Amino acid sequence: MPQLSFVVSGRNDNYDGNFDERLIIALEHNIESLPTAEFIFVEWNPYLDRPLTSEKLRDHFGDKIRYFVVHPKYHKYYCSIDEFLEYPAKNVGIRRSQGEFVGCINSDIIFCPDLVENLKNKLIPNILYRATRIDIRPDYLRVVFPFHSKYILEKNYGYMNAAGDFLLMHRNLWHTITGYCEEYPWQRLHKDAYLVYLLVDIKKFKVKNIGSITHWRHPSSWSNGKCRAKVGDPNWNFTLCDFRTNKKTWGLSFAQEIDKDGITWLM
């Protein structure tokens, strides 16, 4: 069993024009920084008439990553408001991860040296680990540490802020909370903050900042203030919602898995 697993999600739409480039650069850095960790890529609801992002990653990284592709038929099982569902996709990876501690990260974040060093230390099972997200200029793709402050646009603080970019905890805690909420199908936004709220404010688990990550502020970044209505209500007050865990089938645990050329399809 590896000590660490990291789950990344995406699809073959080259989001914001250079998704594939940002994804590969970030994975190259993060895998090199933590070579013994397990990395999982979940491709949700791909276009079946286009090459898969998973295929591009497989051809580039080989067996350094485990690849899962969720057939489009499962998208309608969850909702009809959006073409890509980040959190059900991450739940697929969480349920199939093998690490003692499992982290969910976004596709365009890079582990900073302080985070990498702290991840090499002993982690505590009942603590929720978060990281400070540093938004950097989108043209600074080849990040080299330490980097000049001129590349920094903003630092995101607070244990619920930018929670989708880095969230790490023991695998037993993920299974206790049943991953990210798959209820409220009309709402995609803030499911990350909702999970942190349930763990810290309701369940009273401790939260700890374990370091920093960088994030390229691409055109559709939430921090750019551009939010598509089809992903839900940006003003959703999840603190007023009833506490909910998912069904036992969370993360598509019931789906048939078929291996095709090193890529596992959920069919």
Image (tube, grey):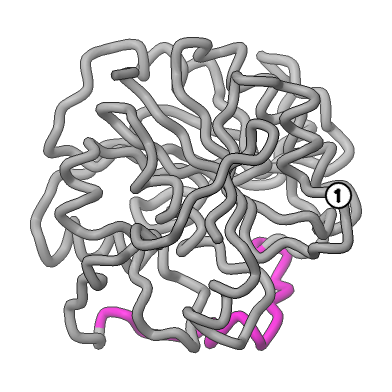
| Quarter that holds the C terminus | bottom right
Residue 63 or 243: which is nearer the viewer? 63
Residue depicted at x 22% and y 36%? 170
Residue 67 figure quarter: top right
64 w.r.t. 248: above or below: above
139 to the left or right of 26: right
Residue depicted at x 83% and y 31%? 141
168 w.r.t. 44: above or below: above
Residue 97 or 169: which is nearer the viewer? 97
Residue lying at the far left of the rendered structure: 204
248 to the left or right of 20: left
Residue 71: within the magenta? no
Residue 151 or 93: which is nearer the viewer? 93
Residue depicted at x 49% and y 31%? 212
Residue depicted at x 50% and y 14%? 34
31 w.r.t. 210: above or below: above
> What is the three-letter code of the residue carrying label 1?
Pro
Q: Give the image location of residue 6, x and y in percent.
A: 46, 34
Number of other residues with Cα within 10 Å of mark 1, as a class: few under 14, some 14 to 19, many 20 or more: few
Q: Give the image location of residue 150, x and y in percent.
A: 79, 32
Residue 228: within the magenta? yes
Residue 213 or 34: which is nearer the viewer? 34
Count of marks, rendered view: 1
Q: Report the magenta residues as a range.
A: 222-239
Q: Give the image location of residue 200, x and y in percent.
A: 18, 56
Residue 120 figure quarter: top left
| Quarter that holds the N terminus | top left
Residue 68 figure quarter: top right
Q: Give the image location of residue 184, x and y in percent.
A: 38, 85
Residue ID for mark 1: 51
